[in-house]
Amino acid sequence: MPNNGETNVQGTQPTSAGAAASSFERLAHQMQDVLGDGGILKQVVQPGEGPLIPQKASVLMHYSAYLESSSRPFESNTYMKHPNIMKLGRDVTLAGLELGLLTMKKGEFSRFLFWPQYAYGEMGCPPLIPPASIILYEEEQNSASLPTLIKVVDTLREFGNRRFRQRNFFNAKGCYKQATTLLANRETQSDAERKEIRASQLLLYLNLSLTELRLDSPQKALKHANNALEIDPSNTKALFRGGQAYAELGDYERAQDCLILAQARKPFDTNINNLLKTVAFWLKDSQDKERDMCRKMFKDLRGL
């Protein structure tokens, strides 16, 4: 099982409170105790194949959750064509749901009953969830294909670009970071997949580097620029971002080195040439001040 899965969750639809209670009781007798404490019961409707979903995997999840007393779900995202990808250990907040997912395999269809300690607790979540409620889920686990993952990543990147254009740099950064996490969690199966993933990562690192510059975080901007250069050492944008970050950090020699390499690849780029001239001026000014300071220190020492 790769680190990215797709989950569809739907609950049964009882017709009355009495029928719901009896159906839950009958269902429980057909289920297996997952943890040994009776808190999570599971029934495999259709077996899956391959290894179990790993911890900290990223999943695409469609779900509907039902109470015993209702014929309609109290929560559902089945109306969404492209639900958000969620990372186990971070985004899945219902303990029973996360633990249930970890028992599943690719292509498996299973039914779960979660007792209150693995759902919403003894207090419930008023007004939707009464105290000490048992929750029913049905889950189908399928692997997300690489094209699906790339499509989600591209959508997140476009959301980030839109927020960047709105000068909402913090939220733009969040979109880019979420996309990079999804790609980092993907277990690649071939050189072709690795190449496609690294191409997507390159665009995200470039966007993150520029965003961190806008957020006045040159050290983080430099980190992302270097990540991009690890993928493509001759990438002009990555070299330019690195030059910008070094310049803001006051390391004018390294800034100049990056910009000279960028200029060699795009000799007529106005932004590169202008920044290179500015950095050259700052470097000379810094060196002049350093020489003046050394002369003054030497004079002081001679006077002593």
Image (spheres, helix red, strand yellow):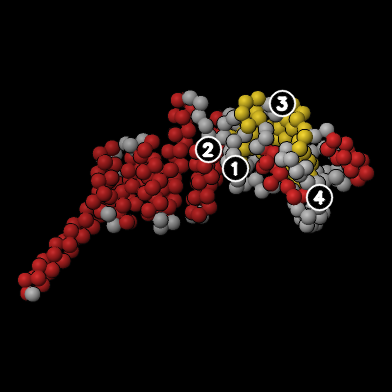
**Residue that label 2 marks:** 185
Query: Which of pointers 4 and 3 lies earlier in the amino acid sequence?
Result: 3
**Residue that label 4 marks:** 133
Figure quadrant of the C terminus: bottom left
**Residue that label 3 marks:** 47
Return the x and y of residue 266 as percentages of the image width and height: 29, 39
- Alpha carbon distance from label 2 to label 3: 25 Å
Mark nearest the camera among 4 and 1 is 4
- Alpha carbon distance from label 4 to label 1: 25 Å
| Residue displayed at 35% across by 39% down | 229
| Residue displayed at 16% across by 66% down | 293
Query: Which of pointers 1 and 3 lies earlier in the amino acid sequence?
Result: 3
Query: Which of pointers 2 and 1 lies earlier in the amino acid sequence?
Result: 1
- Alpha carbon distance from label 2 to label 1: 9 Å
Return the x and y of residue 133 as percentages of the image width and height: 81, 50
Helix, strand or loop at label 2? It is loop
